[in-house]
Amino acid sequence: MSGKQTFEEFFFKLAVLTGVVVLLFSVFNKYDIIMIILRPILAFLVIFILGKSFIYIWEKLSSPNGKKNQSTKIDYVSGEINTYGSKQEDRQKEEHVPGQINSCIKDGLPDADTKAEMVRKMGWEVDQ
């Protein structure tokens, strides 16, 4: 069963359930017979039409054939947007260390001079 049929079935059951609940409340509150008939029908139609419109909007906004647009994906590890240029190809060729954001320190921690340079770039003063 496809996803669309599942959603249509869900919204149909939801609309029927809503109609039954409205019918019970209408009878319990002793409405006129015309209101007892019209209120559940109207409740059913509102929920069912909202469900159908939701499915329609969902289909229109989803990408065709389930393909994702690769140019809009963001690499959350490095914080860069994937592009189809040489930068992406170079990145794939480079050895990737899992969980390592800065590839410069994959061989070990930086020495004291490099740490001091980083501190100066950040604007911190080093007390000696």
Image (spheres, grey):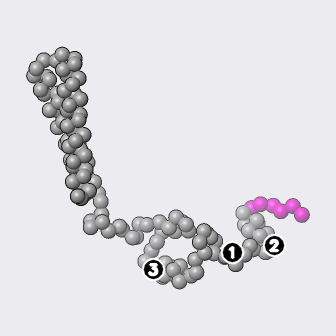
Q: Please tell me whether residue 74 is drawn above or below residue 60 in the rendered image.
A: below
Q: Residues within 10 Å of mark 2 (few under 14, many from 20)?
A: few
| Residue at screen point 23% across, 55% down | 4
Residue type at numbered disc 2:
Ala
Instruction: Judge by depth and name the residue closer to the eye, 124 or 114.
Output: 114
Q: CA distance from mark 2 to mark 3?
A: 36 Å
Q: Which residue in the structure is indicated by mark 2?
A: 112
Q: Give percent across and percent down for residue 19.
A: 20, 32
Residue type at numbered disc 3:
Gly
Span highlighted in magenta in the image: 123-128
| Residue at screen point 23% across, 23% down | 25
Q: Earlier in the sequence, mark 2 or mark 3?
A: 3
The disc at residue 19 is none
127 magenta-colored: yes
58 magenta-colored: no
Q: Nearer the viewer, mark 2 or mark 3?
A: 2
Q: CA distance from mark 2 to mark 1?
A: 13 Å
Q: Give percent across and percent down for residue 92.
A: 51, 80
Q: Earlier in the sequence, mark 2 or mark 1?
A: 1
Left or right of 31? Residue 98 is right
